[in-house]
Image (cartoon, rainbow, N blue to C red):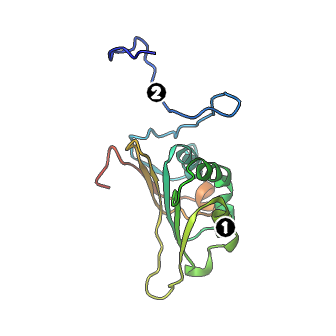
Amino acid sequence: AEIGEEQLLASKEVLASILARNPDGSAPAASAPLTPLLDTTLLTNARGEPRVSSQILTEIQSADRIDVVMAFIRFSGIRPFIASLRRHCERKATTSNLRILTTTYTGSTELKALETLQELGAEIKVSYDTSSARLHAKAWHFHRNSGASTAYIGSSNLTYSAQESGIEWNVRVSGIRNPEV
């Protein structure tokens, strides 16, 4: 079919995503983050506010690559993300599309969590240095080929309480709005 000249649409529709069809021909469901990809915001897990975990889940769906640096990773913290990370790794079947850096600092990271992530296809590096370089960072970087990359930087480890119920401070940064960050 011919594509005509560029013109404004009469309706106020917004293209939200471009997704491959399911094997049965249906369109896959895609949840959008409550915060638009262009915006930068603070997430604290406060009552009535979005939970860090629910926002991370929606970000996984549209990411081309994901980098995570996390001081502590527990199975309870990755459990809500397993299915989405599995789909991400299957959909983006290239090397290093899910990279994770963590530590044994304080002994909080669980082997079961790392083994599960590795089974999904994650490339994992673990710092065993507990004396001089105490990695305590917590960040997710969702790379998008469109340029609408986002990052979460804050206090939430990959534990259930940090993702769901704990009072945490995480800044969600937009690569479009804040490219210098």
Q: Where's residue 1, x and y in %?
A: 46, 15
Q: Residue at x 62, y 63 (%)?
A: 159
Q: Estimate how packed mark 1 is, as few (under 14), some (14 to 19) or many (20 or more) residues with alpha carbons within 10 Å.
A: some
Relative to the observer, which residue lies in front, 109 or 126? 126
Task: Say above or below: 50 vs 141.
Answer: above
Q: Estimate how packed mark 2 is, as few (under 14), some (14 to 19) or many (20 or more) residues with alpha carbons within 10 Å.
A: few
Looking at the image, tell me whether mark 1 or mark 2 is earlier in sequence order.
2
Amino acid under disc 2 = Leu
Is there CB contact under 8 Å for labels 1 and 2?
no
Looking at the image, residue 120 sits to the left or right of residue 62; the answer is right
**Secondary element at tag 2:** loop
Task: Say above or below: 167 vs 9.
Answer: below
Q: Residue at x 66, y 73 (%)?
A: 110
| Circle count | 2
Q: Residue at x 47, y 80 (%)?
A: 134
- Judged from this view, the residue extending furthest toward the bottom is 131
Q: Where's residue 28, x and y in %?
A: 63, 33
Pointer 1 residue:
113
Task: Say above or below: 80 vs 76.
Answer: above
Pointer 2 residue:
15
Q: Where's residue 104, x and y in %?
A: 57, 79
